[in-house]
Image (cartoon, rainbow, N blue to C red):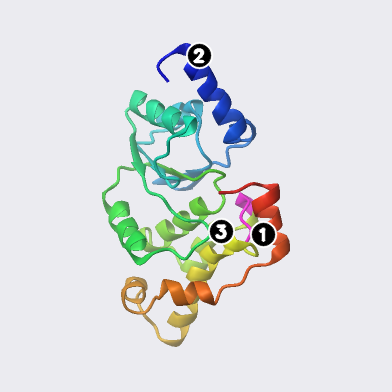
């Protein structure tokens, strides 16, 4: 976006194609611990506010993309001296083992305070917030899983509920055979088998996919 015209088009794309017009009204931003915020896709003004709040890194759960929202985000992070970390997470699939293990290392090395976000701040942000609070900050799993709730716009009954189901599977296994979470991930967890046993509800899928247009 080298010219003023290109920048204007970029802002319009972000507003109406990537639905930033809704996020200007409600950014779904919450501070979940002294070290972490969660939010929807931040605009440049949201990143400026994050910088004023002391945020040192932004964890982008949508991954790097060739679109205006990402370009504007990257520019704003550079302008405010914030590290931008692209870490794509899927909202409708069981997390891969390598994604989980990379997240563990990322939580150990990233600069804090940090802000994590997806598009709407509901599903992927909820999953990673739960994981962060549980494995990095030591919060009990039932408490950490409150990050996956209606409060943030998350529908457990839809395909996005597969993220809740991942933690439910561990909790059920751990109740019968007490096992450390990372041992379960590395030795027991089978993403393919887990996905095959998950079922969503049609009405919830309609709301999430067709009405809300979630990624």
Q: Position of residue 128 (x, y in %)?
A: 44, 55
Instruction: Look at the picture and state if 215 lies above or below 142.
Output: above
Where does label 2 land, which residue? 5
The foreground one among 45 and 50 is 45
Q: Which mark is residue 148?
A: 3
Q: Say whether marks 2 and 1 touch (CB < 8 Å).
A: no
Describe residue 42's horizontal placement relative to residue 103 as left or right.
Answer: right
Mark 2 falls on what kind of element?
helix
Quadrant placement of the N terminus: top left
Mark earlier in primary sequence (2, 1): 2
Q: Position of residue 33 (x, y in %)?
A: 44, 49
From the image, state whether disc 1 or disc 3 is nearer to you: 1
Q: Residue 170 occupies which quadrant of the picture?
A: bottom left
Q: Write the start and end of the magenta stretch as one range.
A: 151-155
From the image, state whether disc 2 or disc 1 is nearer to you: 2
From the image, state whether disc 3 or disc 2 is nearer to you: 2
Residue extending farthest bottom: 176
Mark 1 falls on what kind of element?
helix
Q: Position of residue 210 (x, y in %)?
A: 68, 50
Q: Is residue 88 magenta?
A: no
Mark earlier in primary sequence (1, 3): 3
Where does label 1 land, which residue? 205
CA distance separating discs 1 and 3: 16 Å
At label 3, counting other C-alpha atoms closer than 10 Å, the crowd grade (few under 14, some 14-19, many 20 or more) is many
């Amino acid at each position: 976006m080298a010219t003023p015209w290109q920048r204007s088009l970029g802002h319009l794309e972000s507003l109406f194609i990537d639905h930033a017009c809704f996020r200007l009204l409600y950014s779904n931003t919450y501070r979940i611990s002294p070290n972490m915020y969660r939010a929807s896709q931040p605009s440049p003004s949201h990143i400026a506010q994050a910088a004023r709040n002391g945020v040192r890194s932004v964890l982008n759960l949508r991954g790097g993309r060739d679109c205006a929202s990402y370009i504007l985000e990257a520019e704003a992070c550079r302008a405010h001296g914030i590290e931008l970390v692209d870490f794509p997470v899927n909202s409708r699939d069981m997390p891969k083992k390598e994604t989980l293990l990379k997240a563990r290392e990322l939580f150990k090395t990233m600069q804090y305070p940090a802000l994590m976000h997806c598009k709407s701040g509901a599903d992927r942000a909820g999953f990673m917030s739960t994981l962060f609070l549980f494995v990095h900050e030591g919060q009990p799993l039932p408490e950490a899983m409150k990050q996956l709730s209606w409060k943030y716009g998350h529908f457990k009954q839809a395909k996005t509920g597969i993220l809740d189901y991942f933690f439910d599977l561990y909790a059920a296994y751990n109740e019968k055979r007490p096992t450390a979470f990372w041992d379960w991930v590395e030795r027991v967890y089978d993403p393919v088998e887990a996905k095959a046993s998950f079922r969503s509800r049609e009405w919830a899928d309609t709301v999430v996919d067709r009405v809300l247009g979630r990624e």
